[in-house]
Amino acid sequence: MNGTVLLSVMLSFAISVVLGPLVIPFLKRLKVGQTERTEGPESHLKKNGTPTMGGILFLISVMATSLLFVKDYPRIVPILFLTLGFGLIGFLDDYIKVVLKRSMGLRAWQKFALQIVVTGIFLFYLQRYTDVSLAMKVPFMEGVYLDFGWFNIPIFFFIVLGVVNGTNFTDGLDGLASSVTVLVATFFTVVAIGTGSGIEPITCAVVGALLGFLLFNVHPASVFMGDTGSLALGGFVAATAYMMQMPIYIAIVGFVYLMEVVSVILQVSYFKMTGGKRIFKMAPIHHHFELCGWSETRVVAVFSIVTALLCLVALMAV
C-alpha cells in the first residue's frame, strides 16, 4: 500500500515535470496564448500571450500513472473516465478559442450538452458495473446516509455539474485552482487509504501531477491550465467524492469552488434584478479580493489556507 502511494505520487510528479519544458514551448509555437479581459484587474493584462491548455501536462501524467495500476485497482476506471471526459470537453473549448481563434469557444448549449452526456455515462457505469450507491454519507454522523431514492439522480447531475463548473470558475489566478485541488486530492487520498476504497492510485497521481504542474503555474505563471485542466479537475473531484459516497463533503473541502460559483450566480442575478448594480467589485470572488487591494499571491495563499483547514475539519467529520 505505501509503495503504491509513493510510486503514484512520484511517478506522476516526474512525468509532469519532464513534460513541462517539452509541452510549454510547443504551446507557445501554436500561439495558444491567453487573452485577459480588459475590464479585469490591470495586473492581469501583462499575462496576455501566456500559453494556456497546460492542463494537458497533468492529464497525461494522471492517465499514464493510473493505467499502470488499473488492473489491480479497477475502481479508478470511472474516476479516470470522468476526469478525461471533462478534460476533453475543456480541450475542445480551448482549441476552438485559442487555436481556431473563435472567441466564444464551444457554445454554452454545446458545452452543457457534452457535460450532460459525460456525466450520464459515468452514472450508467456506476449503476451497472459497480456496487457504489448514490446514497451520501452525512458528515459527523457515522453510519448515517442520505438516500432520496429516484431523486438521487437529478441531485447527482446537479452536484457533478456544479462541482465541475465551480472548479472552472476557480481557475482565474496563477496557481489557485492547482493549489486548492492538490489539497482536496490529498484529503481524498487520506480517506481512500483509511477506508480501503481502492482508488488511492489515481488520487495520489493527481496530487503528484498537480505538484509538478505548480512548478510552472505559480505566480508568475509560465502556463495556464485552461478549461482543459479546470474541467478535468472538477470531474476528478466529483467522481472521487461519489466513488466514496462523499459528495456532501465537497461543500466542506471544496468550499472555495462553492464560493466561486455562488459569487458568479449572485453577481449576475443581482445585476439583472437591479439594472446594473453589483454585489462584488468583480466576480468570481477572487477578483473581488484583488480589486480590494489583495495581491494575487495573497489571494491564492488565503484560499489555500482556508482549504487546508477545511480539509482537517472534513477528516474529523469522516
Image (cartoon, rainbow, N blue to C red):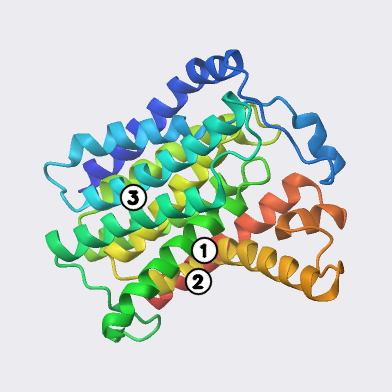
Q: Amino acid at mark 1?
A: Gly
List the residue tagged with mark 2. Answer: 251
Please, what secondary structure does the residue beneath circle 3 have?
Answer: helix
At horizontal 83% and vertical 40% (from top left) the residue drawn is 38
Q: Earlier in the sequence, mark 3 or mark 2?
A: 3
Mark 1 is surrounded, within 10 Å at the Cα level, by few (under 14), some (14 to 19) or many (20 or more) other residues, namely many
Q: Amino acid at mark 2?
A: Ala
Q: Does the rendering let one see residue 197?
A: no
Please, what secondary structure does the residue beneath circle 1 have?
Answer: loop
Along the line of sight, which residue is nearer the eye, 309 or 167? 167
Q: Position of residue 216 (x, y in %)?
A: 58, 29
Q: Is residue 79 left or right of residue 278?
A: left
Along the line of sight, which residue is nearer the eye, 234 or 123? 123
Q: Are marks 1 and 2 in contact (CB under 8 Å)?
A: yes
Q: Amino acid at mark 3?
A: Leu
At horizontal 32% and vertical 63% (from top left) the residue drawn is 191
Q: Quadrant of the C terminus?
A: bottom left
Mark 3 or mark 2: which is in front? 3
Q: Which mark is residue 232?
A: none
Mark 2 is surrounded, within 10 Å at the Cα level, by few (under 14), some (14 to 19) or many (20 or more) other residues, namely some
Q: Are marks 3 and 2 in contact (CB under 8 Å)?
A: no
At horizontal 41% and vertical 50% (from top left) the residue drawn is 114
Q: Is residue 298 left or right of residue 74?
A: right
List the residue tagged with mark 1. Answer: 254
At horizontal 47% and vertical 35% (from top left) the residue drawn is 91
Mark 3 or mark 1: which is in front? 3
Q: Earlier in the sequence, mark 3 or mark 1?
A: 3
List the residue tagged with mark 3. Answer: 82
Q: Position of residue 8 (x, y in %)?
A: 30, 39
Q: Is residue 305 left or right of residue 271?
A: left
Mark 3 is surrounded, within 10 Å at the Cα level, by few (under 14), some (14 to 19) or many (20 or more) other residues, namely many
